[in-house]
Structures are given as structure tokens and as C-alpha cells.
Image (tube, rainbow, N blue to C red):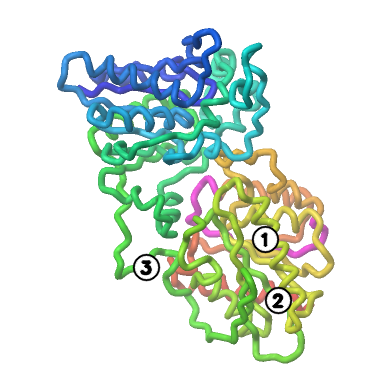
Amino acid sequence: MTAFILVSGVFTGAHVWEETAARLTAAGAEVHTAALTGLDGARPAAGARVDLETHIADVVAVIDAVGAAPAGRDVVLVGHDYGAHPVLGAADRRPERVARVVCLDTGMPQDGVPALTALPGQELRARPAGPGATSGTDGELAPPGRDAWHRWGSTAGVPDTALDRLTALAAPQPLGTLLQPLRLTGAVAAVPTTGVLCTGNGASIEAVRRLVDFGDPALRALTDPRVTFFELPTGHWPMLSCPAELADVLLRAASGEGHRLIPADRAEPPAHLRPFLLEVPAFPRERHDHVDLHLPDAGAPRPAVVFVHGGPVPAGAVPTPRDWPTLVGYARYAAAHGAVGATLDHRLHHVAHYERAAADVAAAVELVRAHPRVDPDRVALWFFSGGGPLTADWLGAPPAWLRCLAATYPVLAPLPNWGLADSRFRPADALAGAGTLPVVLTRVGREAPEIAATVEGFLAAARECRANVEVIDVPHGHHGFETLDPTDESRKAVHRAMLSVLAHLTA
């Protein structure tokens, strides 16, 4: 028999698990919910401080109580969003009693990192916990109103009645639970782990695979055969939107099923490091700080195309994006047509880093424009993938020298799990200020649904404000088709996009 211990996330308690727990019980499992102090009816003692260690102790107490019952059961800990932090902490203290940890629509908590880092874009509008509160971590974070839950994750699929109840029963989150770093001894590394990703909230197994392929050592553990993954096509609260499907996934996870990220064969490079689909000659390259310029065979100042990579890309990725075959291939292809091709590295290492990435791009553009081989009045910007939100600054108020903006398989709105719903990085909202700026958008037919939805939203906004958008379709192309799909269809799309951008530069 499997004994599940279910741990809820921010502002919530055992009530969110009722339907899922009923289905697990009907399948023959034993189910327990952890009452987290200050959130789920368990009030702290007078003057006591509630922090992450408090919640870890709450979960450990349930593990000990379950472990004291008759033996022969596998204990599976399930943590939803913030709940993964006390779950990992508890498993680290009782590794011999835990058969598996399940992280439900959340990143893998890391030693020394507070839960708040997994909640980018959230402002801590804390209120004092009471007369005894003495420090910045002793307050409480007020729960969201009914129409503000999307700040904490997509509510896709949640019935109105369930959303009403979620709001009515929400409790303030003790601030110390979000700000206190998680402390792990390393014992939890031996416990098998499953990640359940909700695609409607912007997460996917393919996105995790891409991050692993970038070579971040911190993510290497995700290729361990004891680590499995599942996807659910729903928003951030699957226990409310699809409890039956969630229960089935939890049962399968407990039995060791799930998708595994097999480490990349060293004879086969990861997708982003495979050869560019076009054979293009190398041109002289100049390296300036975080910018590379690929210079054409021409003495006079030439137009320039600045290629902006996507992300997030881990800070330790090697090689860095400006040396990736796709970016270098595009830059050389531009140089082959008489334009300066520029690639750059920007610091989008986490979805919370868009502001500093935007500053890096702006600085790179000025460096390119100041180069003596560049005509500063004829520049195009070309964005890829997760770099798409960075287009908003340029679309909203395009400078006169910006002759064209291109975007290839772009993410054109922050995904729900990024926590950036009210940020400035929303290209569709900026389009009204684009005027006649030409936009060349390359769209792939085999795009992830959550990214495709942002593109469709952008195009709907473009139609409404009559923006000058040209769409180039690659019907059978995947995200990153330049190295994944070396087909005639893909080559024609790259060629057509390049000629269109260059035509706007020379018009």
C-alpha cells in the first residue's frame, strides 16, 4: 500500500486536496494531508515565529505518525508549488522513511535558496503579524483576491465554484516561510523524485530538457534514472481542475512510472549545438565585451542585424549563446548578404531577469551602432524564443534607426508560471506604439501550445491595431527548427525571413 502525504502551496490548506484524496483512497491508497502552521487551522503559539523550518517540522510530524503505523507501506510526499520546499526539507530529515517525493508544478527547491526565488515578479506586500513582530520576516503576505490568483499561476480549468472556495478559504502566508532559505544535508538526493508539470501554466518536459541540455551542473541530477516526469494539460491547480487525472498521475508516479530525461549521448550534441541548417562561409569576427560582430566583405558602413537569443539560459552554460550554431549561422548569413551580423550574450538566466537582459540588449545595440563598419541609421533587431518579451520595449517606441524587428518562434507574452503578468514585457500591449515598423515573425507549426497561444494573442493584437506584421510559417517545424529540422521547408523559411529583413534595412 502507498501512503500519500499531500502538502499544499501558498495561501492554501488541506481543502484543495479533497477530490484528489478521495480518488486516491478509492484506488486503495492511504492519504494524509499536512496541516501547515499558520495556514491550515494550526495556529502558532503566542509570540512564536512561523518560518520554513516550522513547516518542515509539520511535515516531519506527519511522516513520523505514518511511520509509526503498521509497516509495509511506501510513503510518498507530494508538494504543490511552495509546498515542495517543506516536502524536500522533511524528506531530507527522514530519507529512510520516504519512498518518493513528488513536486507538483514547481521547480526543484535548492539548498540555501528561499522559496521566494521561485515566485518571480511577486511583490511582498506584507502586513505585520501582530504587536510582537520585530523583523522583516515576521509579517504575513495577504492572500490574493478572486481575480488575482493568476499572479500565482494559471487558473485554467478551475471551475468558478472552486475558485470562489479557494478565495474564501485562503489564509495569509507567513512571510518567514518564503524568505527563510531551505537547508538540506544532501540526504534527500537518494530519494526518488517525480516532477508533475502543468502545461497550461507554462511548464513542459521539453522545456526542462532544454534547460538540462544547456549544461547547468545544478540540473544534472534531473537525468538520474530515479527522476521521472509527467505532464498535465491544465493550469497550476490540477487538484481543482482535473483531480481524477492528477490522482492517476500520482499513483503512476508512486509505482516508478514516468518520462525520464536520458543524458545526451556524447556522440550526439544537444539540439541547440547541432549544425545550422545552411552552409554559410565564415566571415571576419570581432569580439567586443559581450558582443560579436561578423563583418561582410565591404569597406563602407553597412546595415546591421542584431540577433538576440532566448532563454532563460543558465549562467554556467558553455558555450554561451553568441557561439551557438543557430545564432552564428544567422549572423554569417546576414554577412553573406552584405550586412553586419551581431550576436550577443545577455543575462537572462532566470525569468526574473528580464529587466537586466533588456539593459544588456540596449547596451549591445549601442555598441553595434557605434562601430565604424555599421551604418547607425539602418539596424534591425531579431529575437528568438524566450527573448520574445524583450521586443516590447522596441515595439512600444521604435527609434528612427530601427528599420525592422524580427522574431523567430518567439514567446510573445510571459507564461503564467513566470509571475510577470503585470510587467512591461508584453509585446501585444506595446504594438499600438509600433506605427509602421515592419515586423517579420517566423512561426512554427509544431510549437508548444502554451507558446503558440502567445503568438496568436500577439497576431490578434496586430490585426486590431493594423500593425505591419509579416508571418512566415514553417508548418512542420519545431521550436529551434534551424538545428532540429534541416529540411527544404526550413531552409526556405530562413532564406525568406533574411531577405525580408534585409529588404527593410535597404529600403
Residue at 72% from the left image edge and 53% from the top image edge? 392
Mark 3 or mark 2: whose residue is earlier in sequence:
3
Q: What is the span of residues highlighted in magenta in the rendered image?
A: 434-451
Going by the image, does 185 lie left or right of 425?
left
Residue 22 image offset from top left, x and y in percent:
34, 16
Residue 257 lies, with reference to residue 147, above or below; the image says below
**Residue 269 tag number:** 3
Going by the image, does 100 lie left or right of 371?
left
Say which amino acid is labelled 1. Asp
Say which amino acid is labelled 3. Pro
Q: Is residue 165 visible?
A: yes
Residue at 63% from the left image edge and 68% from the top image edge? 307
Which image quadrant is residue 343 in?
A: bottom right
**Residue 360 tag number:** 1
Front residue (pair 339, 323): 323
Residue 9 lies, with reference to residue 206, above or below; the image says above
Nearest-to-viewer mark from 1 and 2: 1
Residue 499 image offset from top left, x and y in percent:
65, 76
The total of numbered circles placed on residues is 3
Is 440 magenta? The answer is yes
- Residue assigned mark 2: 304
Residue at 54% from the left image edge and 18% from the top image edge? 166
Mark 1 or mark 2: whose residue is earlier in sequence:
2
Secondary structure of the residue carrying tag 2 is strand
Front residue (pair 284, 459): 284
